[in-house]
Amino acid sequence: MHELELTQEKSYRIGRHGSDEVWIHRQEVVQSAVSFPVFLYNSCNHLVTQKSISPVTFCLQERHSGQILALLRMDVEQDSLWSLPSAPFGGIEFDENISEESLLVMLTCVREWCKEQSFRFCAVKAPPTAYNSSRDLFLEKIYLTAGFKDYQSLTNHHIDVTAASFETILSNSERKRLKKCLLAGFTTAKLTNPESDFVYDFLAENREKQGYTLPIQKQQVQDLLQQLPEQISVFVVKDEQQIIALTLVVRVSQDILYNFCPADDLRYRAYSPTVLLNAALYEYAQQQRIRLIDLGVSLDHLGEEKPSLQRFKENIGGKLSCKKTYRADL
């Protein structure tokens, strides 16, 4: 396992561009110094729930005020540095008025610093392109020009939330399954103060029956629910008092919801209660003025893309986007 061997300083400068400077920080970056909103995974509140090894934050800062104009969170994973290894994504985030040249200088400094630290490569898991499609080509150009390669590109699905009802975006087959759930008397709920042990056990047990391992540990579920109650929610489908489907939901930003970890009781598979579960998320998103529900990538137990799961997401209104990982070999 690679351990960072930095100077005794918690923060120091590694580059400069005009009046802007590139800094590396070992301690938490004060959120008030950031001049732009960041996705949850790049926030201090979420980072403390992760199993970090040697976390660092690269910042582009205005020299005189110290205001942060761009940041990139990273952490060690074996002999490489990732943004972010334990989160769905990381990626560089920045003020909308920043110049292309400044971002290029920052990423070039990051790559050169990683090389000096003898990492084998550094990699960035970017957000799905649907999160901010207007920035996608701009960011891709920055990464590629700074010496990163398009290392992996996965199909991602999302639902655009509009004033239309959820039923109108369903395929005929999923519309029938939704009606079947409703006729059976199934109900949905957003749990208040969910018990983390129950949530974990339900997800782990029902995913294991389908040959999947849970991508999160029991302690992490507890930490997320306890430390981020406003951003992490649990939605369920019930047959009377019995929970038959459940998902962990992440408020990634003010207008984006991520259906992170759904599972359902296989004994109810004929009803497909996950359709009703997604209907509840869609209605909640409408109420909260959320514009997009991220359904994530569709991978099997071997990490390969799973066509049947992709079709299901498209049948419930999912639209295609791309989730890329950029990598610089050093």
Image (cartoon, rainbow, N blue to C red):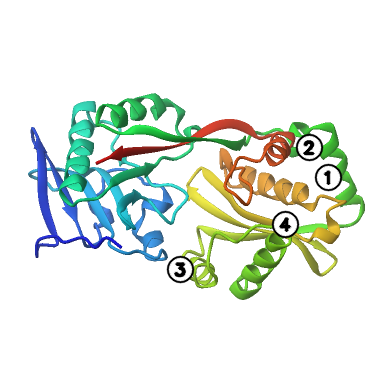
As shown in the figure, which amino acid type bears the numbered disc 4? Gln
The kind of residue on which mark 3 rests is: Gln
Instruction: Tell me which label, 1 or 2, sits earlier in the chain.
Output: 2
User: Where is mark 4, residue-wise?
Assistant: 210
Q: How far apart are the alpha carbons under marks 2 and 4?
A: 27 Å
* Residue 45 x/y as whole percent: 38, 61
Residue flagged by tag 2: what amino acid is it? Glu
Indicate the quadrant where residue 162 lies: top right
Residue designated by label 2: 167
Closest to the observer: 288 or 245? 245
Residue 143 higher or lower than 194, as above or below? above
- In three-dimensional space, the C-alpha distance between marks 4 and 3, rounded to whole angstroms, equals 30 Å
Residues at circles 1 and 2 in contact by the CB criterion of under 8 Å:
yes
Query: Which element carries disc 3, helix, strand or loop?
Result: helix
Q: Is residue 73 above or below residue 50?
A: above
Q: Earlier in the sequence, mark 3 or mark 2?
A: 2
Could you tell me the amino acid type at mark 1? Leu
Q: CA distance from mark 1 to mark 3?
A: 34 Å
The tag earlier along the polypeptide, 4 or 3, is 4
Q: Is residue 179 left or right of residue 169?
A: right
CA gap, disc 1 and disc 4: 22 Å
Q: Earlier in the sequence, mark 1 or mark 3?
A: 1
Q: Which mark is residue 227?
A: 3
**Element class at badge 1:** helix
Regarding residue 308, the answer to whether it shows in the image is yes
Q: Residues within 10 Å of mark 2 (few under 14, many from 20)?
A: some
Q: Quadrant of the N terminus?
A: bottom left
